[in-house]
Every structure is written in C-alpha cells, then in structure tokens.
Amino acid sequence: MSQRFLAFLIIIAVASALASQQLTYIPIILGSAEKVTWKTFKDSAGLFSIQYPSKWEARNGTNPVAPIDVEFWYYGDASNMPDTDAMVALVVSPNSEFLTTQDMIKNDQLAIESSGVNFRLEQGTECNAYVINQVQGCSLISSLSFPEQKYGRNVLIVSAVDNSTDIQYSMILSASEDVFEQFKPVFDHMVNSFELNSNALVG
C-alpha cells in the first residue's frame, strides 16, 4: 500500500469520526479570506512557512515518512453547526514517486475511489487554477458521504510535481458540504501563502 493511499485513508477516517465529537470552537467569519485574521506557521527546521486562520488549530500530520506533514483544523460551533468542520492538510516530499503532476492527481483520485466510502466526483482534473510554491498544480473535487453524518464531506485536492527538484506537493481541503464554498477562499489563500525552503528540504 503506497504512503499516499494510506494518507488518504487516514484523512477520510478522521473526517468520519469528527461527527461524533462535541468540540466547540469560536467560528471564524466565513465567506471571505480578507475577513480572516491570519497567523504564520513556521516549521521549526526552517523548511517552510504558511499562513492559516488564527482560530484554527495546527497539528502534526499522520504521514510517517514525509518531512513536511502538517494539518490545520477548524471545528464548528457544536450547538449551531454540529456537523461542521474543516481541515487543510499539507504534505511535501522530496524524491517524488510520480513523473508528472497528472500522474499524481490520477493516483489521488484512484486512492479515494478505492477507499470504500460513498464517492462522487464533483469536479474532474483541472490544471490551471492552482500554483504551489511556483509549481503549476492540478486539482479535483470529490464528495464523500457517511451514513452517520448529516452533512457529507467535500474534498479538494491540489497536487504538483516539480520536475526540476523532484519535490511533490499536496494540499487538501476537507470540509462539510454545507460550508465548503465558504472555506474555499481560505484554502486558496493558504495555498498562495506557502513558501518552501527547497535547499533545506533536499540538502
């Protein structure tokens, strides 16, 4: 089982489990990235920096081999939006296992289709909307549904392979379908704010 397939299974499992938790955080103002108060996350090893909403929680990710693996979590108000949550995952690795960005995004789609959850492709592969660290990325959007949850989860995946450095990038937005469109500008800002120290990563 590839490390990327394993990572997707973990993301899907965590998204499913969140519906049963009664966590209450103060909601951010949704709908516009300009209305969000931003913090900058700087890696302790000096590998990268990225901006994220100040009311979100930054955590280490679940990929055991990627040198850059961090997640940013938002939990809705449990009294008003009991099923609402969002997560942005960032995973960056040298020595890409894919030759092209198109190969990587195809693998992403296959990983979700093979995960065993109810899956629907909302937007097929698109390769003009996102750039990660000056590398053109490809994206797709899928919808995942779980019987125990009121709302499904929409997942936006952006992947890129830099052929000049052999570095592969993944950024993923997983959000309740009721707020996915409001969180998308926040995700877009996070993608644009990401800066990598390539020399430190591959050195």
Image (cartoon, rainbow, N blue to C red):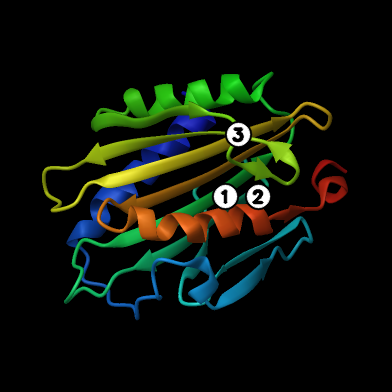
Q: Residue flagged by tag 3: what amino acid is it?
A: Asn
| Percent x, y of residue 96 | 69, 28
**Which comes sooner in the sequence, label 3 or label 1?**
1
Residue at point 39% right, 69% down?
30
| Percent x, y of residue 86 | 37, 58
Q: Which residue is mark 2?
A: 68
The answer to the question of whether label 3 and label 1 lie on touching residues, with beta carbons closer than 8 A, is no
Residue at point 32% right, 61% down?
85
Q: Secondary structure at mark 1?
A: strand
**Which comes sooner in the sequence, label 3 or label 2?**
2
The answer to the question of whether label 2 and label 1 lie on touching residues, with beta carbons closer than 8 A, is yes
Q: Residue flagged by tag 2: what amino acid is it?
A: Ile
| Percent x, y of residue 160 | 64, 33
Q: CA distance from mark 3 to mark 2?
A: 24 Å
Q: Nearer the viewer, residue 12 or 163?
A: 163
Vertical comparison of 169 with 164: above or below = below
| Percent x, y of residue 152 | 22, 46
Q: Which residue is mark 1?
A: 90
Residue at point 18% right, 60% down?
20
Q: Which residue is mark 3?
A: 128
Q: Quadrant of the C terminus?
A: top right
Q: Nearer the viewer, mark 2 or mark 1?
A: 1
Vertical comparison of 40 with 190: above or below = below
Q: Secondary structure at mark 2?
A: strand
